[in-house]
Image (cartoon, rainbow, N blue to C red):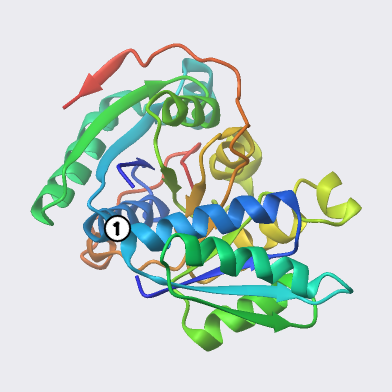
């Protein structure tokens, strides 16, 4: 794996994506490409923490701004740069995106022609389940 | 990265998950735990597919493939609701990532069995990697069997 594209938008969920992408890049030796699809005033704020996070982990990273529909722009950039994987948060900044449990994430999972990693918040704790009944070794 | 959980069955999408898990394990040095979910009797009545006896074969084939690539791998059979079981198992095992196949394309299968990958994404506490667009060596050899309903795809 050489290049991991991480989609950021300044939301809490995109911070999860930055952490997950940076951790994966550190484990595999891949480089990171952070992309922020510009919708308004938050472009610089969205990319600066991402680059800082990669720098702390010693991961090679660059950042790029894109325009257009978020899912289209992310997929186009991933194809153009030959990214091996796309990393996204489980939902984005917009009200509609939060209500729809991540419409951009869901669209990327549905349409992407390469693997998509959906990051999860570290504090998320689903209900306890019993242990499996059988195990093979 | 230490532990990768890869949710598999006998579908083609599942072979993509298997392939991606092996590649990621090779690059990161992680171990793979393949998991497959044996469907409850109610789903058997709807689908006509008894997955319980297929589970061992599915896991054995995946573990052999991983071992041949030089990756440490084990297999676990889970029982119950696929999304809940896979997400819960990954959390208990402190997995770094869950890998699932791309979603089922057949509308009828999705309507009856639901999308397991979507359910895992909703319930999981760890990142979920959907293995779209990954060419599978085993699929190219024609080793994929018919996809049962309720697959991780």
Image quarter where the C terminus of chain A lies is: top left
User: Can I make out residue A56 in this image?
Assistant: yes
What's the chain of the residue with tag 1? B
Q: Residue at x 38, y 60 (%)?
A: A26
In the drawing, does residue B145 fall left or right of residue A35? left
Q: Residue at x 24, y 62 (%)?
A: B142
Give the labeled residue for mark 1.
B19
Q: Residue at x 60, y 82 (%)?
A: A77
Q: Nearer the viewer, residue A134 or B26?
A: B26
Picture quadrant where residue B119 is located? top right
Q: Nearer the viewer, residue B130 or A87?
A: A87
Residue A62 location, x and y as percent?
Answer: 54, 79
* As drawn, A23 above or below B147: below
Residue A7 location, x and y as percent?
Answer: 64, 67
User: Can I make out residue A115 in this image?
Assistant: no
Residue B131 location, x and y as percent?
Answer: 44, 58
Q: Residue at x 71, y 82 (%)?
A: A65
Image quarter where the N terminus of chain A lies is: bottom left
């Amino acid at each position: 794996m050489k290049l991991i594209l991480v989609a950021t938008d300044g939301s809490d969920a995109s911070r999860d994506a930055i952490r997950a992408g940076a951790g994966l890049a550190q484990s595999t030796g891949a480089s990171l490409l952070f992309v922020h699809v510009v919708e308004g005033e938050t472009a610089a704020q969205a990319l600066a923490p991402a680059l800082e996070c990669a720098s702390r982990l010693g991961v090679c990273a660059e950042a790029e701004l894109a325009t257009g529909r978020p899912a289209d722009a992310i997929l186009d950039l991933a194809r153009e740069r030959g990214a091996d994987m796309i990393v996204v948060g489980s939902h984005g900044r917009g009200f509609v995106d939060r209500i729809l449990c991540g419409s951009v994430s869901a669209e990327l999972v549905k349409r992407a022609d390469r693997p998509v990693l959906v990051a999860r918040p570290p504090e998320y704790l689903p209900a306890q389940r019993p242990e499996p009944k059988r195990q093979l070794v | 990265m230490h532990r990768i959980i890869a949710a598999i069955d006998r579908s083609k999408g599942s072979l993509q998950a298997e392939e991606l898990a092996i590649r990621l394990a090779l690059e990161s040095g992680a171990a793979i735990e393949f998991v497959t979910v044996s469907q409850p009797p109610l789903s058997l009545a709807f689908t006509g597919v008894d997955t319980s006896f297929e589970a061992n074969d599915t896991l054995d084939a995946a573990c052999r493939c991983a071992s041949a690539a030089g990756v440490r791998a084990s297999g676990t059979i889970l029982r119950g609701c696929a999304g809940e079981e896979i997400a819960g198992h990954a959390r208990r095992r402190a997995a770094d990532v869950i890998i699932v196949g791309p979603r089922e394309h057949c509308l009828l299968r999705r309507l009856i069995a639901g999308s397991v990958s979507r359910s895992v994404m909703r319930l999981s506490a760890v990142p979920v990697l959907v293995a779209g667009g990954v060419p599978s060596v085993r699929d190219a050899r024609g080793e994929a069997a018919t996809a049962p309903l309720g697959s991780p795809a």
